[in-house]
Image (spheres, helix red, strand yellow):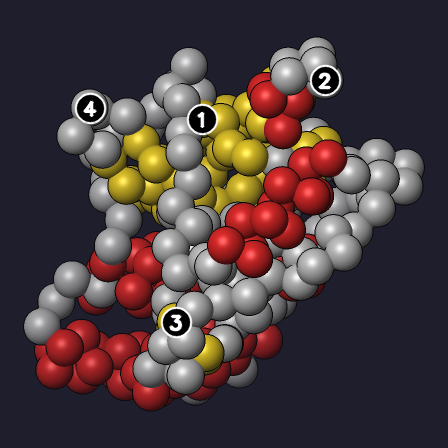
Amino acid sequence: MTMIAANHGGMTSKALMAIALAAATIGSLPAQACSMAAGYKTPTTLELVAGSDSIVLARVGAAIGDGSGPDQTSVELIPEQLVDGTEMPARLQIFGHLGTDRFQATPSDPNELHKANPDAFMGGCNRYVFKRGMLLLLFLRKMPDGSFRIVSSAFARTLEDVPDADAPWVRAVRYYNSVARLPKKEAKTLMQAERERLEATGDPVDALLAKDIGRQISGKRSQNFD
């Protein structure tokens, strides 16, 4: 199994304490909300794509450990499809829990392309409760030792679940992958043209994508901590 240590860049010690409390008290929400360092900027989707070495769709599997040690706070993720990149790890592991009757995972809105899943705002800066069988879109970075790290930037759309590989969020990420690493001026020109094309189709999903492309062009972020 490829072991993963998720990237929580920008978190303060208060945030890390909140995560620890969440791990110890899965039956209730953390008592302390996550705080970010001044100046932290939630990455845009374009930035998440540009900073990833691979992007995969992965299925939430089993909880790791028997509940008696530190592994009780891990969940297995099984990659099923490579969205971008040349390598797909066989297994991933991330901090988190499977939902319980008292504390259930909130499914992502399939038509939301800007804001993170509501559970990201429940105390730990990121989602940490998942439902077995959920399909997650994950941004990965390759480490010097060959393993992959799951990008989980605070309050960003890094751990969103989708109904299938044709969901609007997957379509958006696939498109941004085609322009994210181009020179900014060239990327902006292409995105403007794609936004106009999508707006003209009259399709409701295309309209969602066109609106989000407009946000990426403007650099609008879902959260700022200036």
Residue 10: image quadrant is bottom left
- Determine whether label 4 and label 3 are within 8 Å by CB: no
Residue 187 seen: yes
Say which residue appears at 25% left-offset and 29% top-offset: 87
Reading the chain from its start, which is encountered first: label 4 or label 2? 2
Say which residue appears at 55% left-offset and 66% top-offset: 35
Residue 67 image label: 2
- Determine whether label 4 and label 2 are within 8 Å by CB: no
Q: Position of residue 112 (x, y in %)?
A: 59, 68
Q: Which residue is mark 4?
A: 145
Q: Which residue is mark 3?
A: 40
Say which residue appears at 45% left-offset and 78% top-offset: 225
Q: Amino acid at mark 2?
A: Gly
Camera-side residue of 99 and 28? 28
Q: CA distance from mark 1 to mark 2?
A: 19 Å
Q: Is residue 89 above or below residue 39?
A: above
Q: CA distance from mark 1 to mark 4?
A: 15 Å
Q: CA distance from mark 2 to mark 3?
A: 34 Å
Residue 92 image label: 1
Camera-side residue of 182 and 155? 155
Reading the chain from its start, which is encountered first: label 1 or label 3? 3
Q: Residues within 10 Å of mark 4 (few under 14, many from 20)?
A: few
Reading the chain from its start, which is encountered first: label 2 or label 3? 3
Q: Position of residue 41 (x, y in %)?
A: 38, 73
Disc nearest the viewer among 1 and 2:
2
Say which residue appears at 69% left-offset and 43% top-offset: 21
Disc nearest the viewer among 4 and 2:
2
Q: CA distance from mark 4 to mark 3?
A: 28 Å
